[in-house]
Amino acid sequence: MPQQDLVNADCIVIQGSNMAECHPVGFQWVMEAKARGAKVIHIDPRFTRTSALADLYVPIRAGTDIAFLGGVINYILSNELDFREYVLAYTNAATILNEDFRDTEDLDGLFSGYSPKQRAYDPTSWRYQGRQQAASTEDATSEGMAIHRQTAAGLEQESHGPPVPALTERDETLQHPRCVYQILKRHFSRYTPEIVEQICGVPKKLFLEVCEAWTRNSGRDRTTALVYSVGWTQHTVGVQYIRAGAIIQLLLGNVGRPGGGVLALRGHASIQGSTDIPTLFNLLPGYLPMPHHAKHPTLEQWIGDIHQPGQKGFWANARAYAVSLLKAYWGEAATADNDYCYDYLPRLTGDHGTYRQVLNMIDGKIKGYFLLGQNPAVGSAHGKAQRLGMANLDWLVVRDLYLIESATFWKDGPEVATGEIVPTECRTEVFFLPAASHVEKEGTFTQTQRLLQWREKAVDPPGDCRSELWFFYHLGRIIKAKLAGSTLPRDRAILDLTWDYPTHGPHDEPSAEAVLKEINGYEVATGRPVPGFTELADDGSTACGCWIYSGVYADGVNQAARRKPRHEQDPVASEWGWAWPANRRLLYNRASADPAGRPWSDRKAYIWWDEEAGQWTGYDVPDFERTKPPDYRPPADAAGVEALAGDDAFIMQGDGKGWLYAPTGLVDGPLPTHYEPAESPVPNPLYGQHTNPTRMIYDRPDNQLNPAESEVFPYVFSAGRLTEHHTGGGMSRTVAYLSELQPEMFIEVSPQLAAERGLTHLGWAHVVTARAVVEGRVLITERLRPLRVEGRIIHQIWLPYHWGSQGLTTGDSANDLFGITLDPNVLIQESKVGTCDIRPGRRPTGPALLEYLADYRRRAGLDGASGPNGASRSSGRRRSGGRTDPGKPGRAAGTRRRGKNAGAEGE
Amino acid sequence: MGEQSPASAGYQQPPPRMGFFTDTSVCIGCKACEVACKEWNQVPDDGLNLLGMSFDNTGGLSANTWRHVAFIEQPRNGDTGSGMRWLMSSDVCKHCTRAACLDVCPTGALFRTEFGTVVVQEDICNGCGYCIPACPYGVIDQRRGDGRAWKCTLCYDRLKADLTPACAKACPTASIQYGPLEELRERAQARLEQLHEAGETSARLYGHDPDDGVGGAGAFFLLLDEPEVYGLPPDPVVTTRDLPAMWRRAGLAALTMAAAAVVAFLGRRP
């Protein structure tokens, strides 16, 4: 949903997001909604600037949001408060499941299909009872499961309209014991207000107040919007957090309607863009999956895996999107005879996620690294692993505005003080290349709501600073020149690459508009830009760099550069910038009309069927075929777009429905389930299964986790951002006007915890985990409060993560405290919750710091072997003997992940 | 303001008096106003000092901070789950109708603009510092190493070019509103009534009243608590208000003493 659409909400629930502080500009729409009478609710471990402006603030224990959201789902279902007409028409509530399915209720916190050995699920039993069980059984083999997990293939499958039959068995009365509605009801039946209070520390009265506000402000006449950001995603159950929120919004009929929906706030300028045209290892542009070497040896097998025969929806045209992409990459060389150079595409061989790569660097498996727009030495979880990894390369290229910590760690990082990195011996050759800032180059940003906005260049970059486009264009040009004349087959992919962007100016800056035109797509024969993705062909006659962006250069006009003021157009403002897909501002907006095509209410009218004109109309671009009437029913043998009925509002899903229950696509279960965080001070009162059983674990001496319920690490901590600073701090700690506003690293504690540990306001304290010790000045504040959880008091600590060794203000980096444990679906790290100890005073320095940490680990019962020098076994005190398997294929470098399911930084 | 208002300062057909209405009930404490002000006006930074005053690390208005956001953490019992309230408020020079700084300035560096605002001319100020104790709000301040007095100009240069002042332009939630003062006062009154209806009974306007001690402020506020909570004087009075009377009284006292002396002599026994 667009941020501007928040003004149409009657209630806004913000959870897992500090919107006012981290998205202050977008927060104006929350304030406007509030002024119009909307109720604003903020649920967060800590009272923030967002809480200050909310009508209702609900404190919660970090890492327990699924218990809370499950409680809301239970409240809706047990009181039958769902928007029944919407639920029946647009969700899979009535769909009947396979009789082999077993729920967490049956298996003490596990779903059917779990293999303890693989630590993975075989999802076969989760599927719909189907007449045409379309799914291949390949994924169910143990090898398939392993590939699925390693490459985070789950979510990419979900977005592709995964293998589900177009026609499903349904019970419109919702009474069948195996229909999704009943399964959902049973699954969440134990998430009572009492259990919410017990797990989350949220008083029952407050919890019920949220439930009442959310349900009262949803339905035919009213809508509630849900806002989240990385407070939800950065968990070992991050994807399931979002699923839980989506289930509530679907049950209450809030998806696809004005003032409703789920707003995922992206953390900075073009994070959305870097998932659409991804910097992610497992995706190609437009969410096409990166092929796997074993599963996808041929073009047909690859495309066959993106969409299943007989399935509904727009992914049925995946071949057109894929072939057009290959044509954009390899131009004339890509022909039908050579499968459009499909063999040139790199293949996945396993987990190439950013954290796997860092550990591979420590192990000497990666030789070189490009770092752009990212400061992992500060911004990523387990900062020490990041730095030790980068200290064990042949070469490291850092392009940034300033000399960030990721370029200077070898001489002033914390490991230099402890002796783990010796500057004169560090083997990594660091190349620092100054980068042009966003005002010094042209191009687009794609922001939170899929909106592309063109930026003009305001000034020339100073000195040697250059744009990323310049860097990569000329890097590619020079590599091509160096390879010219090569007859090696491996060089063909580069030699055949189309690399013909026009350049201008004294530095031969490539034309960003030419790139945008290629992204938009064009007819190969004439060069005419295509008007949209529906015109893409699968025979090589069109080329398109990113099918979902198709239309951004329609008519040869840069649509992203449109800047018609909002006062001169309707509130949807369709003529400001350009939103993918097809300039739609609100996705799935067919659901804003009832099954017969009429607005659910006058108050919430958005898109409707105009009988006379024979087409869908309204304020936005309809997210539906424009002339397909609401009563259209597909022929029995229809597939793809044709199979979408006139009331299949969720046009990208294989069954055309919004998913309350995910029969496939997720690695860790078809329904959200409360598991404790990887580091938790309490047991899981709901199930015997304590933690997400499929979480991605990297069990090694340099990545130890605090034991559960450890008395040595009794406190919960979380880390986050301040308005005054920017992520890893490179763009704010270097600026006096920002640094003075938050001039020093600090640690927020409650008065009660301060009393318990003898901490004084503005005095020093240090926080300890199995990985690191981080110090800062103490801020004692009522904004943090102890919670009563499972019969005991839990204290929570909060730290900003902006500091490092460079800039006008320096300090310890909070991300050093976290270990590496990942969500299994998207491989994002759990960096919003952990356990720790806190002590007054400054931390030890030098080698004494390692002794201090080792002592903590010993007392916590962790591997005592890693003494003060144990952790440096694989560290930056480099000798060539420390490297292993230098020639192994696993080191395919350059795949850097950032954004949605990648870096801790940002977002 | 009528023609007689001191804020019109004798300009012939001046534009309407312009000012700020700062609605603190929608302030999110982002400090964009502080940064935008410094960027535009090239105000130096105020030093890196962690003050421990909630999220306030600039401390107050000064020669180097012309917009200042106060953060007040208040314990609160009852209605909400929070158990507390976090007030945020962006303070600024009040651009008083009766401005004491202007009255005491011996060089004419401080002057009243055609927009009714009060501005220091940096090329005229001689750093005498008289204006500093004169300000009833403690706004104007001497810059160290420079000696001259500095404060908010209400972006006089931008106003001249028909632009919104930097702080108001940067404010994402329209907490800082800029416009003709009369219009702002109406808007503020409507907002106050809206908040009162919503049960926010402690909301009040501050500095909006032309009959107050400074003749009304050109930059006034909507507060959610007593002014003292925000560090604002509850009943500011133009410090030069009593000067004539004081001089009169001093003269009278001198006369009385002289008379007493005369009487003393006259009354002496022969």
Image (tube, grey):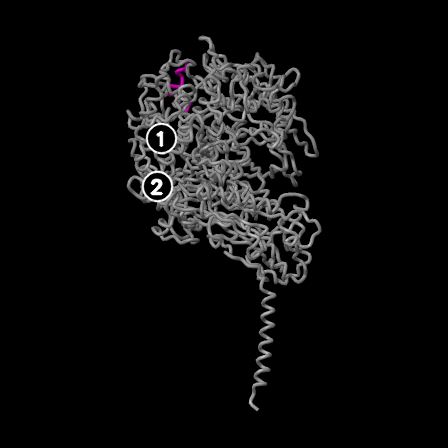
The answer to whether residue A898 shows anywhere in this view is no
Residue type, mark 1 in image? Gly
How would you classify the magenta stretch by its main secondary structure? Answer: helix
Instruction: Where is residue B167? Give x, y as percent.
Output: 58, 45
Which mark identifies residue A70? 1
User: At x 53% / y 34%, what residue is drawn?
Assistant: A369
**Disc 2 chain ID:** A
Question: Which residue is at the front of the view, A340 or A366?
Answer: A340
Q: Cα distance, mark 2 to mark 1?
A: 42 Å
Residue type, mark 2 in image? Ala
In front: label 2 or label 1: 1
Report the side of A186 relative to A421 (left or right): left
User: At x 62% / y 22%, what residue is drawn?
Assistant: A554
Instruction: Where is residue A439? Give x, y as percent.
Output: 62, 37
Q: Which residues are magenta?
A: A134-148
Which element is circle 1 on? helix
Structural crowding at the residue carrying mark 2, measured as other residues with C-alpha within 10 Å and reported as few (<14), some (14–19) or many (≥20): few
Closer to the N terminus: mark 2 or mark 1? 1
Which element is circle 2 on? loop
Question: Which residue is at the front of the view, A834 or A762?
Answer: A762
Q: Is residue A144 magenta?
A: yes
Q: Are marks 2 and 1 in contact (CB under 8 Å)?
A: no
**Disc 1 chain ID:** A
Question: Which residue is at the front of the view, A139 or A33?
Answer: A33
Q: Is residue A732 magenta?
A: no
Residue named by callout 2 = A865
Instruction: Where is residue A76? Give x, y as percent.
Output: 36, 28
Which mark identifies residue A688? none
Instruction: Where is residue A819? Give x, y as percent.
Output: 41, 38
